[in-house]
Amino acid sequence: MNYFSEMLRLPVVDSTGEKIGVVNDLGIATGEIFPHVTSLAFQGPGKTPFMISWRKYVERFDDDGVYLKCPATDIRFSYLQPDEVLLSRDIMNKQIVDTQGLKVVRVNDIKFSSSVENQLRMLGAEVGARGLLRAIHPSLEHAVARMAKAIGKPLPEDIIAWSYMDLLERSTKQIKLSVSHKTLDELHPADIADIIEKLDPRLRSQVFAQLDTAQAAEAISEFDDEDLRSEMLEGMSDRDASSMLALMDPDDAAEIIDELGSEKAEKLLRLMGVADERAIRNLLGYEEDTAGRIMTSEFVALPATDTVADAVEAIRKLDEDFESVYYVYTLDPAGALTGVLSLRSIIVAEKTDRLRDLAYKDVVWVAPDLDQEEVAEEMAKYNLAAIPVCDETKHILGIVTVDDAMDVMTEEHAEDLQIAGVSAGENTTGESTHALMWFAQRQYWILVWAIAACAIAALVVPKADSVNAAIGVADYITSWALRSLMPVAIMPIVLLAAMRMTSFVKRSFLEQDDHEDEQHPYLAFFAKTTLIGVVLGGVVMLCGELVGGNLFAEAEPWAAKAFHNCFLAASGVIVATYATSAVYLRVLNWRDEHDLPTSGTALTFVAVVLSAVAFSVLGTLPLL
Amino acid sequence: MTKNTKRKLTVGAVLGAMGPGLLAALSGNDAGGIATYSSAGASYGYGMLWMLPVMTLLLIVVQETAARCGCVTGKGLASLIREKFGVRRSVLAMAALLVANTAVTISEFAGIASGLALFGIPASVSVPLVALLIWMLTMGGSFQRIEKVLLAVSCVFVTYVVAAFMAGPDWGEVARVTVIPEFEADPGYVSLVVATIGTTIAPWMVFLAQNNVVDKNSDEDDIVLARIDTVSGSIAADLIAWFIIITTGTVLFPAGVQIADAADAAKALEPIAGEFSTVLFAAGLVAASFLAACVLPGVTSSAICEAFGWERGADRSWDEAPLYRGIITAIIGASALMVLMPGVDLFQIMMTSQVINGVLLPVVLVFQVFIAADKHIMGEYRNGRIWTVLTWATIVLITVLTVVMFALQAMGY
């Protein structure tokens, strides 16, 4: 008797040997690590459900039934206790969170251990393939397990202990779980966010609603998906949402509020405390993706004349949810930034030392309108854990901390990768891009070529019924088919040139530091790429002459001419393609400025299709 | 943390709610649908028009139930089946779904192949290329980008409405046969009836309708809007089917054209498109089939993974969700191979798959009707008596028809 699936439907027999029903469900006490089975629910005649205490009435059980201590007439029925969970109703077949493996799984079976004859403890929930197979039929499980063993890959049981289970369903949420229970809310907010993202929308908002406000605040800023964030906020009452935002770091809160509609944002801001509201509004005043937007107003700045003891005291007095302190900044009487101290230098210094004597005077700071990517680069360059953001008079407005800088780096890196065409979706985990997919994103030009070739054939090769039957129909059509083969054969050169062009554009886009420093960035780029195009076109043309000269030296003149025309068309298309490259760069810049994600693959695809169409037309015209 | 706003029924909300259902309905007339309705019109004239009002009612019943279940529970049908009926019966339901949906996917590939054949591309070329393309679109998650384009192209079947008017049928007669049923005891007729049911109320639609409301996180307050959506969508879908049967019944039936391939079916559009009817028909057929072929493997795999608790979703990698991706790959691969088998009759495949759909539909409906009537799951929103009776009537009707169909075939008609 090891599994719940085997217990279900067992007959329940009283002490007189009379069958009084079949096992329907089992209740467990939730306060233990390996919970005892405490109640037995069975179905009597006429489908009437009964529940009795397991400890009081069950004498023993085996593969054939559950045997009671007394006759049916002496049994007193009981009710489900508040600390009891019913296995079949609440756990079997339900979705649970494995708080150790950080996964959302479905329970296929439940494993027991029977220590004493009439005692049954729940070991955990079986969530693997074996439980599934056993539920279909135990012999299927045996067969598959034996087969798996034979091929050297034994099928392990996948069991989640009770203490690492979090039940998601609302009906079971009222139950008080034991102290030792590791529930979802004890996980790191980043892990909570990961799990919530894997749930169905309804469960998502339910689970989210159960987190306390501080956890919700942290979890919500960990979501990768912006839509999910607003979805969660929509599901909360305005008051809850507003107090949650107030708990968050102001820069994270500003980012979320910025994604909301202005009406809702305004409502939430007004519900906050004055200080929080001002902090967030200040940040919102700066443009998106600048230092001002990602900075936090929570930093330690003291007059340069203060002593080390004052500084320690100031740090001690900070709130618990204050942003991590990396540095202490010193100010002159006018409030302007004069120096910076690391925590270490404060700890090792004498208590009476003045801050101005210890401070490092040559402080690196940034202006609030600086692009966030450059802020991150500054921090990387000077190895800073935080960088102050100052106005023109060197008054500190806030600091950008290293965690925000790392987010910026990841974000910008993902964008760059996407433009470079490495990853098509949001996946930046590297491994996720399948090898075949990787190949397909680069070599789809073959498909474009095939389709264009079909179009050329359809245009050039005459239909059999339109040919005068007096001349040899097959020969005539064959000669035309061979003629149309010329543009078809030459087209790959054009397509490959187009692909090279877009990768050149993408590279220029990623490498350009500042597009404002040149007077006419696009004109210069146009001139440069057109020149490349002309050279490339010229080389293609000459190569064509070389090949054509050898192939058709002694052939009929029309063949050499047709071949020549095809290469002429190819060079023309190449020059035109490269001349338009400034347009692609403009598109990339425009989309970047408007914060639209751009897929490099799509960009290349457009270029390839355009040049395929252009060449099909130009290459076919002389043949018609 | 409670919901703070109660939704109001405004004109905007109603129109907005009607959108998705209408779009789904327009694209729902996929390869199998076009084939079945065209055949119905060509072989029996207006003889099958009476089915459509009945089918519309049943479709509304089934779709409304699915949407309501989704709104109340916030779970997909597969989850509900697993949680109420356990593993064994879930296996049965999922097997039925897998077989039915693979059959439909095969018919979509047949639709693509025969549509592209009208452009002169042989199936042996088009099917592997298209299969690879569909596989990459579903795996890469970039399907959403072209979804709208495909939807737009597949809407060319709305031209059947114009074509029906231009064909100039006897509208009095059409109206009469739409409301007065006739029946023929011919195995071809019976299997066409089963196919029509199977294509109008496909098992995958039931799952998709429920998933749609679950993904939107609709709740009890949204049931009214979901109803508007399903009713308008169902009526629009069947209206187009009705016009297809009228068009083919007017143009092809008197001429005695038996539809044997897509080119025959395209002839019904000649009154409106003339010599371009083939191009129009082929473009619509390819787009609609392509759209459905991209959606179906994902819907199937998602339902199976949902029932058995495996990770799923287009944004999960092979490492995270191997079974989800594996099932999709298997369905696409198997379907492409079936269509590529030498000597298959593409049009016959499209028809047969709808029959399989019809035969397996009762399996899904039985699960649905039990869940929708369950007090614990549905609470006050459980099925009323009329709805339960209608669903059971559908189940019994299809089962009887299936038995009759096989019996007639066994008796060697």
Image: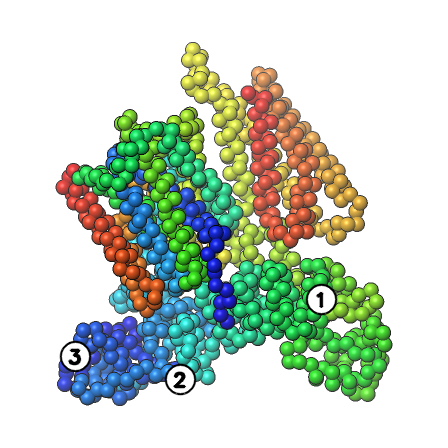
Residue A142 is situated, as x and y percent measured from the top left of the image, at 28, 67
For disc 2, the marked residue is: A32
Amino acid at dot 1 = Asn
Whether A558 is drawn above or below B261: the answer is above
Q: Is residue A469 above or below residue A534?
A: above
* Label 3 neighbour load within 10 Å: few <14, some 14-19, many 20+: some
Could you tell me residue A469's position as x and y percent? 42, 13
Q: Earlier in the sequence, mark 1 or mark 3?
A: 3
Work out whether mark 1 precedes mark 2 in sequence or the reverse, and give the earlier one.
2
Mark 1 chain: A
Judged from the image, the secondary structure of the residue bearing numbered disc 2 is loop
Same chain for mark 1 and mark 2? The answer is yes
- In this rendering, position of residue A313 left or right of residue B315: right
The residue lying at 27 percent from left, 35 percent from top is B46
Of labels 3 and 2, earlier in sequence is 3
Q: Are marks 3 and 2 in contact (CB under 8 Å)?
A: no
Q: Residues within 10 Å of mark 1 (few under 14, many from 20)?
A: some
Side of B392 relative to B105 (left or right): left
Q: Amino acid at mark 2?
A: Glu
**In which quadrant will I find the C terminus of chain A?**
top right
Q: Which dot, 1 or 3, sits closer to the camera?
A: 1
Question: What residue did someone put label 1 on?
Answer: A282
Residue at 61% x, 20% y is A561
CA distance for labels 1 and 3? 75 Å
Residue A19: which disc? 3
Residue at 64 percent across and 45 percent down: it is: A503
Which circle, 1 or 2, is nearer the viewer? 1
Q: Nearer the viewer, residue A395 or B369?
A: B369
Q: Chain of mark 3?
A: A
Crowdedness of circle 2 by 10 Å Cα count: few (<14), some, many (20+)?
some
Position of the N terminus of chain A, as image quadrant, is bottom left
